[in-house]
Image: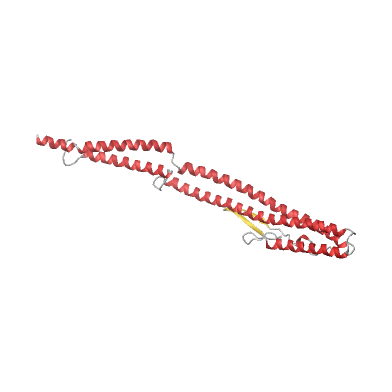
Amino acid sequence: MLAIKNNIMAEGAARHLSMSYDALARSIERLSSGLRINSAKDDAAGLAVRELMRAEIAVIKQGARNAQDGISMLQTMEGAMASIDQLLIRMKELAEQAATGSYSLNQRNIMNNEFQQMIAEIDRIATTTTFNSINMLNSATGYSTIHFGTGSQIQVNSVDVTASALGIASASLSGGDGANAISALALVTGAIEIKDSARASLGYMMNRLESTTAVLNIQAENLMASESRISDVDVATEMAMLTRNQVLAQAGIAMLSQANSMPRMALDLLRS
């Protein structure tokens, strides 16, 4: 019907043009952000799942960093024990030297002075080596808990490598006949065995934490892939939608222009 007061065709064209523009804006937003879900109205259920996944990914990644921090702590302690190892080797060498009968009492006393300094150094290393104020070398009953998320943790037990725990606190090389040196030689041998056991326990835990880190990284990667499938935009599909919406918007503009010219046809009829 040819009418002047109401231009129904223009109203319809304008409505379809508005819909095309909304779809075009949505495609541009998705392509510019890289996300299929930019607000709850895009996909309310998908948004809820995505946010839960993102929270879980963040927790897993932090758990992996916690494990790495635990490894760093154990590496610090193990490095200190490597120094203790060198001291015990030198102490055993001195004990062997002092055990032979070709040295005088005075010479054994000189050897013992160095021997005693090394005992003191072992104690100093064991009691002062810390990581973030945590000491893992001066107690056989302490522990640190490495946390990887809700209900997931590993307890790392401390070790005691002080001179008294190693059994060498009272060892001495002094004495004229070398008997004390022979006794000290046995004590240092036992101390090396105790130290080796303690150092190995730190190695076991480092290996375990490294395995845990690898598993956590795989879990985070898989969750990120799942989150991507839910949240990320399919660029190829969205580009096709963008092109379609651009064509519809251009067609809508053209048709709106045509619809707006219809009242003029009625005016021309009235003039004639």
Q: Quadrant of residue 37?
A: top left
Is residue 8 visible in the rendered structure shown here? yes
Q: Quadrant of residue 121?
A: bottom right
Residue at x 85% of width, y 57% of height = 97
Q: Is residue 228 above or below residue 156?
A: above
The quadrant of the picture occupied by the C terminus is: top left
Residue furthest to the left = 272
Q: Is residue 169 left or right of 179 when viewed as pictured?
A: left
Judging depth in this view, the residue of 119 and 73 nearest the camera is: 119
Q: Is residue 219 left or right of 110 when viewed as pictured?
A: left
Q: Is residue 183 above or below residue 203?
A: below
Count numbered badges in the picture. Answer: 0
Judging depth in this view, the residue of 204 and 191 nearest the camera is: 191
Residue at x 55% of width, y 46% of height = 220
Judging depth in this view, the residue of 104 and 24 nearest the camera is: 104
Q: Is residue 211 left or right of 1 when viewed as pictured?
A: right
Q: How is the image coloured?
A: secondary structure
Residue 267 at what x, y percent from top left? 13, 37
Is residue 151 visible in the rendered structure shown here? no
Q: Is residue 20 left or right of 9 when viewed as pictured?
A: right
Q: Is residue 37 above or below residue 185?
A: above
Residue 142 at what x, y percent from top left? 68, 60
The quadrant of the picture occupied by the N terminus is: top left
Residue 184 at what x, y percent from top left? 83, 60
Residue 18 at what x, y percent from top left? 29, 42
